Image: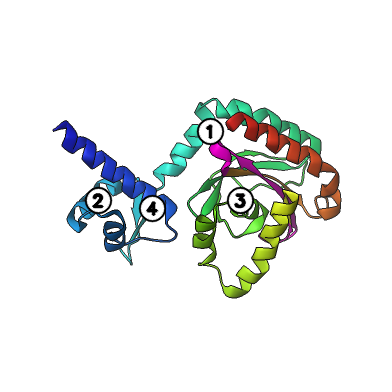
Amino acid sequence: MSTKTSSTVQRAIQIINYLNESPGLQGVKEISDNLNISPPITHRLLTTLKMEGLVFQDAESKKYSLGTAFLEYANKFISDLPIASIIDPPLIQLRDATQETLGFYMLTSMYRICVIEHVSKQEISRKAGVGNKIPLHLGSSGRVILAYLNKDLQEQVLKYVSEEERNKLLPKLEEVRDTGYSINEEELTDNVGALSVPVFGAKGKVIAAISVSGPLFRWNKESMQPHIPFLLETARGISEKLY
């Protein structure tokens, strides 16, 4: 009985990991074929995972992706575990030094999700909002994560980008690897600029991005320049503690 239970749990974990690593929605047959789990068992496990909010089923295609429960887990992970005590103080220092909004975005599948945000104290400020989910190929925070993903994962993301976008994006990713940071001006939101750097975790894998964002009249390529060394230093310090 215990062996059967362990096997069921293991298969459920395999499905969750597969959905996490695969771009876009996945059907029962795709999951079954790739994991070598029979379609009936795959369907039964997906139904159970769906009931618990661990997977989401698209109403039209009937295909699956990770569920919203994982966003809740990510938020709890950040707020409850010691990692919060590692990340928060330097982020607040950066917010105070730049006087702009600090966001900490974690990698999840093909997206980045804002899990910590310290909003600027200035009257006019930028606010993305905790829980904000953005595709990796968009914006400076997405670029600094995408640039350091392994080639297979990077290709999974890029194959869903148009050829024109891809041709524009690849040189920017190369620039990120050369400089260690990325800047955007009005790419995602009018009159907003952002400066982002990557954060690395276990085995040196990229896991997140730190972003400083603000209104373009105050936070732009010129005004960002003096803060780049401090931002890079802060990201290195956080990464070293997460290794």
Locate the N terminus and report the quarter of the image it occupies.
top left
Q: Is residue 126 visible?
A: yes
Mark 4 highlights which residue?
19
Q: Secondary structure at mark 1?
A: helix
Residue 28, percent from left and from top: 27, 60
Q: Secondary structure at mark 2?
A: helix
Report the residue at 32% width, 43% height from top.
13
Mark 3 highlights which residue?
148
Q: Secondary structure at mark 3?
A: loop
Q: Residues within 10 Å of mark 4 (few under 14, many from 20)?
A: many
Mark 1 highlights which residue?
78
Alpha carbon separation for disc pair 1 and 4: 22 Å
Mark 2 highlights which residue?
47
Residue 164, percent from left and from top: 62, 74
Q: Earlier in the sequence, mark 1 or mark 4?
A: 4
Residue 189, percent from left and from top: 68, 59
Locate the C terminus and report the quarter of the image it occupies.
top right
Q: Which mark is residue 97?
A: none
In the depicted view, which residue is nearer to us: 234 or 194? 234
Report the residue at 26% width, 57% height from top.
32
> Mark 4 against mark 2, which lies toward the viewer?
4
Please check the rendered image and state whether residue 201 is part of the magenta-colored stretch, yes or no: yes
Q: In the rendered structure, which segment of residues is drawn in magenta?
A: 184-206
Q: Residue furthest bottom?
A: 164
Q: Earlier in the sequence, mark 3 or mark 2?
A: 2
What amino acid is at disc 4? Leu
Q: Residues within 10 Å of mark 1 (few under 14, many from 20)?
A: some
